[in-house]
Image: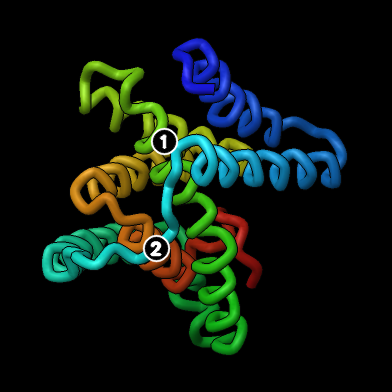
Amino acid sequence: MNSVTYKLTEFFLIFIILPVSFALDYPFYIKAFLAISGFAYVIYILLKVEDKKFRIAPNLQWRFFWKHVGIKLLIIAFLTIGYMLLTAKSDLFHVLYRKPKLWVVILFAYAMFSVYPQELIYRTLYFQRYGSLFKSRWLFIFVNAIVFSLGHIFYRNPLVMLMTFLGGILFALTYQKTESTLLVSIEHAIYGCWLFTVGMGQMLGFPG
């Protein structure tokens, strides 16, 4: 399971074939089965093959993390508020104002059941298992952003693809610096929750 051929095949199936298949029209229950089976396989590989321990690291770089996330969030907020004012002013913060209870529920559910599994797959597994396949670290990060964007192809939205590509670069750099699934999951959750809050949640599949 650790041969180059096996890893390349595994990479192709997990990060290309499966995500692209979700953009095709076939029964949802089959997609759900494939997604759950794929995630179970990822957990197996991390625990049994890569011997990854799921524990909070004792030396988390909180000061570095909050400083950099805060700066990036300000830039994202400026750009996204500007985008909403230009394209859908009436939707700006509409869920927060009109459905605050739904807003709270969705933020919690998104962080727990969407963000963390994504980071286990696209950062923890990717960095733990496939680093040896790349000679260039920058190419490694670029491909990570590409496959992360591809993982959202089922939305069939070019803007979503662009945003997730840029987000993939940010998350990959954070994981490279901290090697913490917890920290990169928090960062991912902050940006995703902001997009929902500012009024861009519909394109990302958020209800409301």
| 169 shown above or below 6 | below
| 47 shown above or below 103 | above
Query: Judging from the image, what secondary structure is the residue with disc 1 in?
Result: helix
The x, y position of residue 58, in whole percent, is: 24, 67
Q: If the image is split into quadrants, where does the N terminus sit?
A: top right
User: What label does residue 55 carry, if any?
Assistant: 2
On the question of residue 191 being in view, the answer is no
On the question of residue 131 being in view, the answer is yes
Q: Which residue is mark 1?
A: 126
| 184 shown above or below 207 | above
| 200 shown above or below 131 | below
Callout 1: 10 Å neighbours few (<14), some, many (20+)? some
The x, y position of residue 60, in whole percent, is: 21, 65
The x, y position of residue 62, in whole percent, is: 18, 69
**Quarter of the image holding residue 22?**
top right
Of badges 1 and 2, nearer the viewer stands: 2
The x, y position of residue 39, in whole percent, is: 63, 45
Q: Earlier in the sequence, mark 1 or mark 2?
A: 2
- Residue type at numbered disc 1: Tyr
